[in-house]
Image (cartoon, helix red, strand yellow):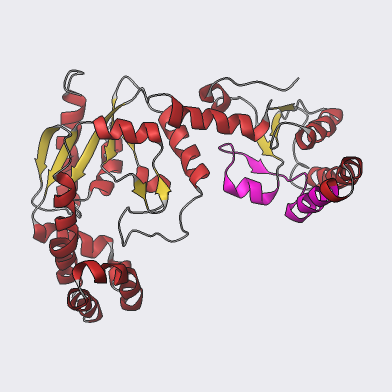
Amino acid sequence: MPLQFDALSPLLAHGFDTVIDVRSPAEFAEDHVPGAINLPALDNDQRAEVGTIYKQVSPFDARKIGAGMVIRNVADHIDGPLRGMDGGWRPLVYCWRGGQRSGVFRTILSEIGWRAETIKGGYQSYRRLVAQSLYDVPLPHRLVLLDGNTGTAKTDLLPRLAARGVQVLDLEGLACHRGSLLGAMPGGQPRQKAFETGLAVALAGLDPARPVVVEAESSKIGRLVLPKMLWQAMLAAPRIMMDVPLAARAAYLAHAYREVIADTPALAARLAPLRHLRGNAVVDRWVALSAAGALETLAGALVAEHYDPAYAKSRRIDTRDVIAVVAAGRLDDAGQDHAADRIAAIVEGSDEGCL
């Protein structure tokens, strides 16, 4: 009988040796249960072919032809990736709705002697649990926002805080984007569903009884949208402000974004949307600074002439409480370590009434 999970945490703590997603590679790429491997019962082309036969010929013919494809594919998986599994191996198998593909796969594995099980409702039941945790139920976590102007090393401070035992949620890391016009990262961003899976898993691993530090973000990171309950919790969360002089921020950004701002043609393309906002002359000057290799000067100009004004405008409508201001005169390793020490002391030393 398929296993039924009524909450996300028990599913994530399933206890099986391997989770096998038997959906097509395209379905798997959009999102999947964390840690699952993809052993398709039908590949992309086969799934499309069976679907066409189902609609244009008959459901019976589709099932008959599809069954042959599935059995041959399962045999290939057994002779390939699963060849080395011993008799005690316990796999958990799922497909889209927990039906035919995973059922056939499980039956064949069980006949061999492996203790295979399936997930009732398949991926759809898992997806409902993720969506419920992010869209329907208020987060139980007590968030603290790490805020400050662009270039105050907020993202780099998160792993330093984690090393000091502070709970953190790295939204930009999960979104694979630095959260600004120049924030695109190699490899691009995950799909929205995969991003939400990452969020749900990360939140499930955090203790709701302790504060969680999150970098202050807008409601979108790149093209990805923050789920409703997370965004509401962030809007209500108190803030710790980073206060860093412009020169130190420019030096930090020139180093952190060097690959981005040193590539003049690519930078010009990324800055093009700002021409209507900041004017052609300003953007042309920024591009010229990149071409001249004046990266620190460029970083300072971008901060002073674009990012700080935009931040000041958004701050005028921000009513979240500031519980502390952390000043940092520099943002090298020593400066970041000193800031992380202070933030950790503030977060871990605050009682529940403050947070």
The percent position of residue 293, horizontal first and vertical second, equals: 22, 78
The percent position of residue 211, horizontal first and vertical second, equals: 27, 26
Q: As displayed, is residue 45 above or below residue 339?
A: below
The percent position of residue 283, horizontal first and vertical second, equals: 22, 74
- Looking at the picture, tell me which residue is in the foreground, 94 or 226: 226
Is 199 one of the magenta-colored residues? Answer: no
- Residue 167 visible, this angle: no
Q: As displayed, is residue 99 above or below residue 245?
A: above
Residue positioned 27% across, 60% down in the render:
256
Q: Of all residues shown, which one is farthest toward the front?
A: 56
Residue 210 occupies quadrant: top left
Residue positioned 26% across, 38% down in the render:
161
Left or right? Give the position of 337 relative to 185: left
Image quarter (top left, top right, bottom left or bottom right) of the C terminus: top left
- Residue 222 visible, this angle: yes
Is 36 one of the magenta-colored residues? Answer: yes
Image quarter (top left, top right, bottom left or bottom right) of the N terminus: top right
- Looking at the picture, tell me which residue is in the foreground, 140 or 77: 140
Left or right? Give the position of 1 relative to 304: right
Residue positioned 11% across, 51% down in the render:
244
The percent position of residue 48, horizontal first and vertical second, equals: 76, 52
Residue positioned 75% across, 51% down in the render:
43
Q: Which residues are magenta?
A: 24-53
